[in-house]
Image (cartoon, rainbow, N blue to C red):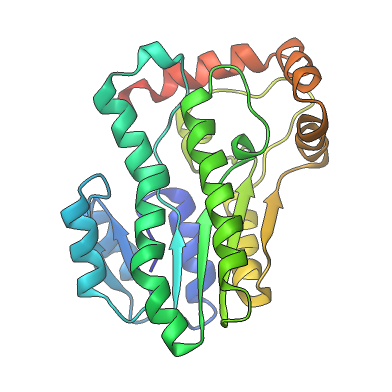
Amino acid sequence: MLTGATGGLGHAIATAIGARGARLVLSGRKPDVLEALAATLPDAVVAAADLTDPASLRALVEAHPDVDVVVANAGMPGSGALDSFSEEEIDRVLDVNLRAPIVLARLYVPRMRARGSGHVVLMSSLSGRAPVAGGALYSATKFGLRGFGASLRADLRGTGVGVSIVSPGFVHDAGMFADSGAALPPGFRTVSPEQVADATVSAIERDRGEVTVAPLELRLGTTLAAVAPELASKVANKLGGDRLAERMAEGQADKR
């Protein structure tokens, strides 16, 4: 089960997993895009769903109960000052980025545990490791997702069911950063959708707890944020992090 399959990052993940011989259930909100993707994959199934709607989410699982691997890839942008979001927009970001992956795990994990096998992949972000200005809402969902995934993995140790967290940095050509049209400050690099897809496959095949997909400079920044968050925040803003957040918020405003 792959959620968020309609986006470019979802396409890359679907292609990489499909190449391993998996039969995919492709979920998203655009049936026509899903159908086009399914036509490129062997035995793929289209399952349109709106993850902001609890009934739609439950219906998705009920229609496809026997899933070996869940990749919770769907996400909504959450960049911008908190007071720029309406309460309804806050709810949508929380529903898609945090609630839906938790509910998917809640519904699928007992079936996996009964079989003694299965895997859940949660698509987080470097924003779930290093807080930045202008990203309070998005970071809240990604920090929450990482905490949930790490605890769930501990709960399932020894059951045959794995949980992995994939944390990409800025991705070019696909995903929310690319769609925003923002540019990184000089000296910072992006990763490709294919790198994120390969990391997702590796997480499943090797049962890796967390995989970070980012260039060295961003890895170092997240390490600094873990041990000295105030210093890391000052350094990020000095390098243009606050301006980047503003540009991303502007580019994502119509997708809330």
Residue 87 in sight in this render: yes
Residue drawn at point x = 45 percent, y = 33 percent: 179
Quarter holding the N terminus is: bottom left
For the image shown, how many numbered marks are present on the structure?
A: 0
Instruction: Give the answer, above or below, for where 62 lies relative to 103.
Output: below
Residue drawn at point x = 30 percent, y = 35 percent: 92
Residue 40 in sight in this render: no
Residue 216, x across and y down, in percent: 82, 41
Instruction: Give the answer, above or below, for where 30 lies relative to 176.
Output: below
Residue 184, x across and y down, in percent: 66, 24
Quarter holding the C terminus is: top left
In the image, is 237 to the left or to the right of 255?
right
In the image, is 239 to the left or to the right of 83?
right
Residue drawn at point x = 46 percent, y = 63 percent: 71
Residue drawn at point x = 27 percent, y = 22 percent: 87
In the image, is 91 to the left or to the right of 217?
left
Instruction: Give the answer, above or below, for where 106 lies relative to 66.
Output: above
Residue 29, x across and y down, in percent: 24, 50
Residue at the extreme front: 155
Residue 143, x across and y down, in percent: 57, 40
Residue at the extreme bottom: 115
Q: Nearer the viewer, residue 97 or 244?
A: 97
Q: Nearer the viewer, residue 88 or 221?
A: 88
In the image, is 30 to the left or to the right of 37?
left
